[in-house]
Amino acid sequence: MTDRLDVAVRAAAGFRTVYATPPAGRWAAPGRVNLIGEHTDYNDGFVLPFALPLRTVVAAAPHPAGRWTVWSELTGETVDFGPDEVAAPGRITGWAAYVAGVVWALREAGHPVPGARLAVASDVPLGAGLSSSAALEAAVLAALVDLGGLDLPAEQRPRLAQRAENRYVGAPTGIMDQSAAIRCRAGHALFLDCRTEQVTHIPFDLDADGLAVLVIDSRAPHRHADGEYADRRASCEQAAALLGVTALRDVPADGLDDALARLVDEEARRRVRHVVTENQRVLDSVALLRAGRSRQIGGLLTASHASMRDDFAITVPEVDTAVEAALAAGALGARMTGGGFGGCVLALVEAAQADQVAAAVTAAYADRAFTPPTHTTVTPAPGATRLD
């Protein structure tokens, strides 16, 4: 993973190189890891993410011509577009679509979006399930809001950023990623009710408890674009319609058996069982964290992974291997995090055992001739902010 200590410096340096002038400011937004609550967000359910210290930084300044020009450190490309090009989804593609989508969503909401020059640098890994796209959207949104003096309270920003990704980019994500990138607090997990968008900041002080969260990049490609995510979402919506509820969030845990008995299709039963039990695991995790019993969420994390593997069918051999090896090496709990089909695994470990668990996962990968994984330990970080 890229050295995260200098990402803000790199963004500013890139801006000066491309535009031959210093930026007016720098804005940062984090990647996120979802502690628990997978594929519950678009089912109006509950999630419990926290923000990572890995950040995307946007250096920006007003554009005198009222256009938007953005440079990416990752690709070395500069993309320029004006009001006509951004007027409809599909005209700007690739990575720049996430930037154009934010401009589009702001304009659609009636905000007078300022023209801007932007330079983007990031240490949020792409394709790892850590929501690099939401980090980019949140950082760009923060920059444009400040540059234009726009009236857009923080609690309204996640929905706008989600609209950019859903409608402009065409990725059918829920509200969790943007909420985490924008609204998280350091030292806390974000308990989000995805129906009401109400958030509660739940203390999650790993250092005080002698714990660590080990994030392991499985190195298996994270493939939202291949339609699997959309298929799962459609399956859940169809099941909700068959059950006569607005969303699967409305199926209570104690009513699960009755709901499953009303479904004929076995695949639909498995999808529903995952969502309903996963919502309950989020609620149980929040209760444990509030009670200061952080270690006891480990079993819920592991149960979540089993549900994603067996009922929702979104894991791959690399992530299953990482989870199994971490647990065998003493992790208190482990699960895949993110939309599935690759990406990252998180393991809750005793802080003193983090290196031991990581080494065990690496050895298990070697035994199976998988591409070696990478890992880092993380602590809950703040959401989007202006740096200077």
Image (cartoon, rainbow, N blue to C red):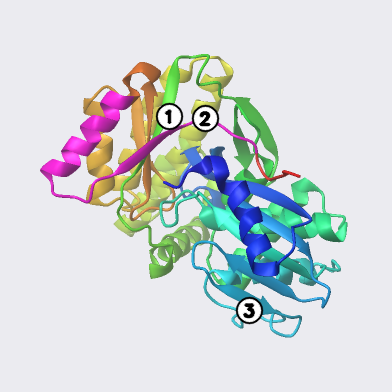
Residue 213 circle label: 1
> On the image, numbered disc 2 is attached to which residue?
379
Residue lying furthest left: 367
Quarter occupied by residue 204: top right
* C-alpha span from label 1 to label 3: 38 Å
Magenta run includes residue 374: yes
- In the rendered image, residue 59, in percent from the top left (x then y), is placed at 69, 56
Residue lying furthest bottom: 84
- In the rendered image, residue 374, in percent from the top left (x then y), is placed at 32, 42
Q: What residue lies at 59% left-to-right and 72% top-to-bottom?
A: 97
Q: Amino acid at mark 1?
A: Val
- In the rendered image, residue 179, in percent from the top left (x then y), is placed at 64, 47
Which portion, as a residue range, is magenta? 355-382
Q: Contact (CB < 8 A) between labels 2 and 1?
A: yes
Name the one closer to the observer, 273 or 363.
363
Name the one closer to the observer, 179 or 1.
1
Q: How many labels sit on residues? A: 3
Counting residues from the start of the chain, the first of labels 3 and 2 encountered is 3
* C-alpha span from label 2 to label 1: 7 Å
Left or right of residue 142, residue 370 in this image? left
Left or right of residue 370, residue 350 in this image? right
Q: The C terminus appears in which quarter of the rendering?
A: top right
> On the image, numbered disc 3 is attached to which residue?
89
Quarter occupied by residue 86: bottom right
